[in-house]
């Protein structure tokens, strides 16, 4: 069995890119382990060409390649590698006899032939050796073909890595022994075709335009004439399709169940020769991969049967099977005899434009006034040089998280790089410990984290507010808009970003809000958002005014800052939280510092 592989992937065989890697279970140079040893250990026969080993690989596992590599053999000339089984004269003689009878056939396959690489492969091979091409076809990124004898197979093996495709990749050649393929057996004789035609006529139901070819190989009319019709043979399937084309091209239903069909290559002509086919029964066959169905994509099937095929085991549940079948055959409404639920769609007779996005939704003027006043105060401080006063906006037990979209590029090259390292994207982060670490707890940690984020300038005019929940004790709302970062020299970056922020707040004081949960999502702005951003003049960021302190308070603040080592903002907050009780504030400070709950930003002066 000869296999020609053009590796459009990186592995140890790729001459173009990948470095050599040694792999477990291989020889000292990392080459292929002799598969014949494994077969002998399993009790299978790998030396001859009529034995159960190679035959079972051909019929049951066409991907079971034996790489034609001499690496598993001794490097001395006395132990030359024999690619076609054990070096036995008996077997060599057997092969010669089989070859004379048309049994000694080698099969090949090539992979990754992009941009018409298959024709290039054939041209390259013909230019290097003389070989008898029995058949040649391409299956996805693999080229399959058979050659007649071991001499041609060995010559073909020597072409490995000597042919380059149009993309610069080396073509690999793999060889496997094989019994003669079924489609090489003699075609049906004219008299056999006439009997087959009569048999199909008996199985045709004109009222339903349905043809039942279930288990046709055991049909009594054919068996009595010693005619063997096996539909997994290319010539037999072609004969059946030709009879259908010439006699019943209007066929609507075709039953091919229980015919040992393992490939659908020979059914591709149905799309043009039987264009009215609506129902196809392929149940109780040997289809192993869902890729086979892609070969029939042109059919406008409404009903499809695939039960009792190995490929059905590939789907984790019935919903996955339904989804796949509908992706290949969008019109299918019946699966294995069961009606499928109608697909969800939109009945739009004429092209309809999507209505424009509405503005903010507050619920009432009272809530609107409350939220707008809060946002103006919050972002005036947030966009200032010092975000420390935001401590007054957060609850003692507040929490905050930040999320950015996942990107495959290097985060350091993205404008979101400063935010990516702290992103708590739950679709990407599965580790519970990491999830907890990325969640900022308590208002001190929240504001300390916000202070570490890049300085920004928000476009207040771009804000859209939607109130999610409102009760007497809780107000939840989402604010969305755009912003840009501001660097030290006062110039803004070219990139404009968009954000969506969910605030969950509780009443504070007579007419204020206190944040208990803050969820910030940041992404790159769209082209339309960039075009509309910062049209109105932006206010100049300024620090939040510091409340006027009395002389004793000012003196206490200076002393506390000196003894604690904290800056004036954090020292003032500590004293205010303890009602300007110096001793109690000092006690609380000492306790929190011992527990490691005071961020480093508090000591930056």
Image: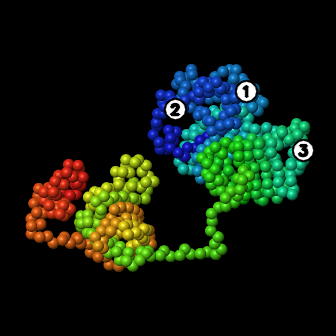
Q: CA distance from mark 1 to mark 2?
A: 30 Å
The C terminus sits in image quarter: bottom left
Q: Nearer the viewer, mark 1 or mark 3?
A: 3
Where residue 244 appears, x then y in whole percent?
A: 83, 53
Q: Earlier in the sequence, mark 2 or mark 3?
A: 2
Q: Residue at x 74, y 47 (%)?
A: 282
Residue with the mark numbered 3: 195
Disc 1 target residue: 96
**In-image side of 343 versus 249 (left or right):** left
**Which colour scheme appears in the figure?**
rainbow
- Give SS at disc 2: loop
Residue beneath the point at 53% across and 45% down: 9
Asked whether the beta carbons under mark 1 and mark 3 sit within 8 Å of each other, the answer is no
Kind of element beneath mark 3: helix
Residue 152 at least partly seen: no
Residue 477 position within the rendered picture, expressed as x and y whole percent measured from the top left: 40, 68
Q: Does residue 162 appear to the left or right of 588 in the view shown?
A: right
Q: Quadrant of residue 62?
A: top right
Determine the residue positioned at 21% across, 52% down: 592
Query: Of 225 and 69, which appears nearest the observer?
Result: 225
Quadrant assignment, res 105: top right
473 to 461, vertically: above or below:
above
**Dot label at residue 31:** 2
User: Mark 1 and 2 residues: CB-CB less than 8 Å, in contact?
Assistant: no
Q: Name the spot of residue 179 as percent of width and height, x first.
A: 72, 33
Nearest the eye: 312 or 45: 312
Q: Residue at x 34, y 62 (%)?
A: 516
- For this view, does 578 lie left or right of residue 521? left
Label 1 Cα crowd, 10 Å radius (few <14 / some 14-19 / many 20+): some
């Amino acid at each position: 069995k000869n296999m020609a592989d053009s590796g459009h992937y990186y592995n140890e065989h790729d001459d173009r890119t990948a470095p050599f890697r040694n792999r477990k279970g291989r020889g000292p140079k990392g080459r292929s382990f002799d598969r014949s040893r494994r077969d002998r250990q399993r009790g299978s026969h790998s030396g001859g060409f009529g034995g159960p080993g190679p035959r079972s690989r051909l019929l049951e596992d066409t991907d079971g390649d034996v790489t034609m590599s001499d690496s598993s053999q001794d490097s001395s000339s006395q132990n030359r590698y024999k690619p076609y089984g054990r070096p036995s004269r008996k077997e060599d003689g057997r092969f010669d006899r089989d070859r004379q009878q048309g049994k000694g056939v080698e099969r090949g396959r090539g992979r990754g032939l992009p941009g018409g690489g298959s024709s290039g492969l054939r041209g390259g091979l013909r230019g290097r050796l003389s070989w008898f091409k029995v058949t040649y076809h391409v299956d996805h990124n693999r080229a399959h073909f058979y050659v007649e004898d071991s001499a041609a197979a060995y010559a073909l093996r020597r072409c490995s890595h000597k042919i380059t495709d149009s993309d610069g990749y080396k073509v690999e050649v793999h060889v496997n022994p094989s019994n003669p393929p079924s489609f090489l057996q003699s075609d049906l004789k004219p008299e056999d075709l006439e009997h087959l035609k009569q048999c199909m006529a008996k199985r045709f139901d004109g009222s339903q335009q349905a043809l039942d070819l279930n288990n046709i190989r055991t049909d009594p009319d054919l068996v009595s004439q010693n005619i063997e019709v096996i539909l997994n043979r290319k010539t037999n399937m072609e004969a059946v399709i030709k009879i259908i084309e010439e006699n019943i091209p209007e066929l609507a239903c075709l039953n091919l169940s229980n015919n040992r069909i393992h490939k659908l290559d020979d059914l591709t002509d149905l799309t043009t020769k039987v264009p009215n086919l609506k129902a196809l029964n392929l149940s109780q066959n040997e289809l192993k991969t869902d890729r086979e169905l892609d070969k029939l994509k042109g059919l406008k099937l409404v009903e499809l049967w695939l039960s009792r095929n190995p490929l059905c085991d590939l789907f984790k549940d019935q919903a996955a099977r339904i989804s796949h079948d509908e992706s290949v055959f969008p019109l299918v409404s019946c699966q294995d005899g069961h009606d499928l639920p109608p697909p969800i769609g939109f009945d739009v007779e004429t092209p309809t434009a999507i209505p424009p996005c509405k503005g903010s939704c507050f619920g009432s003027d009272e809530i609107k006034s409350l939220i707008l006043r809060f946002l103006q105060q919050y972002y005036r401080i947030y966009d200032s040089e010092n975000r420390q006063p935001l401590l007054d906006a957060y609850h003692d037990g507040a929490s905050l998280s930040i999320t950015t979209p996942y990107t495959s590029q290097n985060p350091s090259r993205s404008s979101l790089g400063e935010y990516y390292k702290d992103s708590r994207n739950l679709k990407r982060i599965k580790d519970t410990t990491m999830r907890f670490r990325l969640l900022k707890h308590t208002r001190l940690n929240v504001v300390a984290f916000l202070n570490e984020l890049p300085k920004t300038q928000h476009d207040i005019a771009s804000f859209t507010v939607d109130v999610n929940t409102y009760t007497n004790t809780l107000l939840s709302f989402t604010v969305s808009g755009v912003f840009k970062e501001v660097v030290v020299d006062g110039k803004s970056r070219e990139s404009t970003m968009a954000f969506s922020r969910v605030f969950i707040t509780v009443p504070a004081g007579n007419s204020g809000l206190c944040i208990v949960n803050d969820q910030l999502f940041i992404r790159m702005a769209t082209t339309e958002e960039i075009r509309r951003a910062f049209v109105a003049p932006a206010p100049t960021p300024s620090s939040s005014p510091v409340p006027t302190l009395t002389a004793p308070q000012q003196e206490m603040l200076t002393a506390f800052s000196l003894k604690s080592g904290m800056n004036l903002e954090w020292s003032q907050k500590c004293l205010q939280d303890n009602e300007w009780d110096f001793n109690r504030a000092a006690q609380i400070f000492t306790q929190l510092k011992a527990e490691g709950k005071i961020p480093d930003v508090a000591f930056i002066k």
